[in-house]
Image (tube, rainbow, N blue to C red):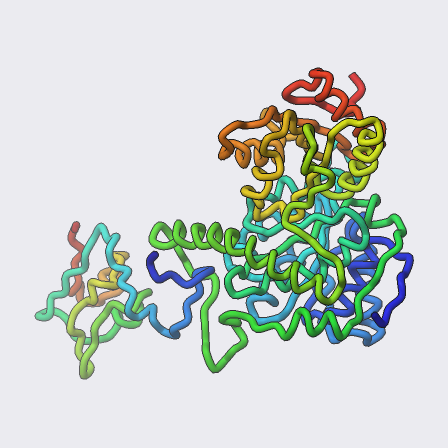
Amino acid sequence: MVNVMPGGRVTEPGNALRFETGDWRSFRPILDREVCIDCMSCWMYCPDDSVIVKDGKIEGIRMTHCKGCGICAKVCPKHAITMVQE
Amino acid sequence: MEHKDIAINGDNAIAMAWKQIDPDVCAAYPITPQTIIVERFSDYVADGEVNTEFVCTESEHSALTVCISAAASGARTVTATASAGLAYMWEMLGIASGLRTPLTMAVANRALSAPINIHCDHGDAMASRDTGWMMIFAENVQEAYDNAIIAPKIAEHPDVQLPMMTCLDGFILTHAIERMTPLDSHAIKDFIGEYRPVHPLLDWKNPVTHGVMDGHDFYFEHRYQIAEAMTAALKVAEDVFEEFEKISGRRYDLVEEYMCKDADYVAVCLGSTFGTMKAAVDQLRKDGKKVGVIMPRLFRPLPSEKIAKAVSGKKGVAVLDKFLSPGSYAPMYEDVLASASSLDKMPKLFSYIYGLGGRDVKVDDLRSVFTDMIAGKAKKVNYLGVRL
């Protein structure tokens, strides 16, 4: 028997962080670092937690959580993100 | 015992049991023939005789929703309903069992509409039988009271963690006054003990989440766990019955048998009919007919093995359902049939549908169930007392 908590209770707070949800994407965002101005629009608008930021710079997209919704590409003022079919 | 025998109806008896249990939360909406239960219990709340938080909701759907939330929070929770009220709760019934909230609900069995009918049959309970709730039935007011005390102890057991309905026949038990021996309140409190919820939401030192998305990854496993918990509940119930005997002197079994050992023909029934059936059996025994009657005290989980054993070797078995499943066979008939299928030699099984919408069923009517079987006149499906 697999270890499943009765009733689907989650007894470890915050473990959703470890649950990878980016497995049903149809489109994937591709970031062009040459064009990106690190304005953080994509980071603010991402409905998940998929934009990786380090030291004030956009480093890339966390593909284990990205659902391919395309909001980042839509809000980017420099069109630095392109959506391509998976 | 501190208490002497009293005269009381089934609804008041359940309210009394709850008063003695002193549950944390009761959320309810009135519906005949259950109303007296929550009405009387709300008196106890208003008079400060219990510490219960009583929530008046705008519907049964909301009542059960509040109860599920309260139980998930870690509160010992009770409610009551009947008929359309139970039907209106239906969506939440599966949520109560799916979230494994061990609350107790008294169901004053009443026919489902339409045409409208307030009287007793088991239509409400039977329509809810696959929702993951345990169901215990009462033959008389004493048992309705006892079941209300027994149920939380089975439901809250860590191996079970499932909600439980304590079913009592509408009007026949809810409104009829019978003689009853109540238990001492301290004995009840000792018997039930303090509620130790598993992973309650209000345990802020150990934060938990209930009701998360399950999907195809885990849903099947969680449903399987409910099936396993039901199996575990059979053993737990037997232990609880044994413990209950120590404080009450009253012995209960998963399957009650009356004059069955040497019987050639037996009937299987639920609820107050068990008592009427005993009278029919007594009369026929005087005429030398070897007959007996069986009642599965627990209907869910079904004590299948014990039912099979009880009907084993009989010439004929009549299964009485106070419910008609249009287009198929009656539920308990199917259950007994499936249970008996594990026997090397299956007895002849007959389905008797009776007492719908409160149609009176007298001892004479019930005697005919046996005399029909003995005379070879019983059909596969019989409608006892319907005017054709």
Residue at the far left in the pictured view? A34
Q: Left or right: B275 with respect to A41? A: right
Picture quarter containing residue B380?
Answer: top right
Residue B39 drawn above or below residue B288: below
Location of residue B10 in the rendering, given as x and y in whole percent from the top left corner = 82, 53
Q: Is residue B29 visible?
A: yes
In the rendered view of the protein, which quadrant contains the N terminus of chain B? Answer: bottom right
Tell me where residue B147 appears, x and y as whole percent: 71, 56
Residue at the image point whose x is 65% and y is 22% from the top: B381
Residue B203 vs B274, above or below: the answer is below
Q: Residue at x 16, y 69 (%)?
A: A60
Q: Is residue B288 left or right of B294 when viewed as pictured?
A: right
Nearest the eye: A76 or B159: B159
Query: Where is the C terminus of chain B found, in terms of image quarters?
Result: top right
Q: Is residue B66 at all visible to an observer of this figure?
A: no
Q: Is residue B274 left or right of residue B328?
A: right
* Residue shown at 77% from the left, 58% from the top: B145
Q: Position of residue A81 (x, y in %)?
A: 17, 62
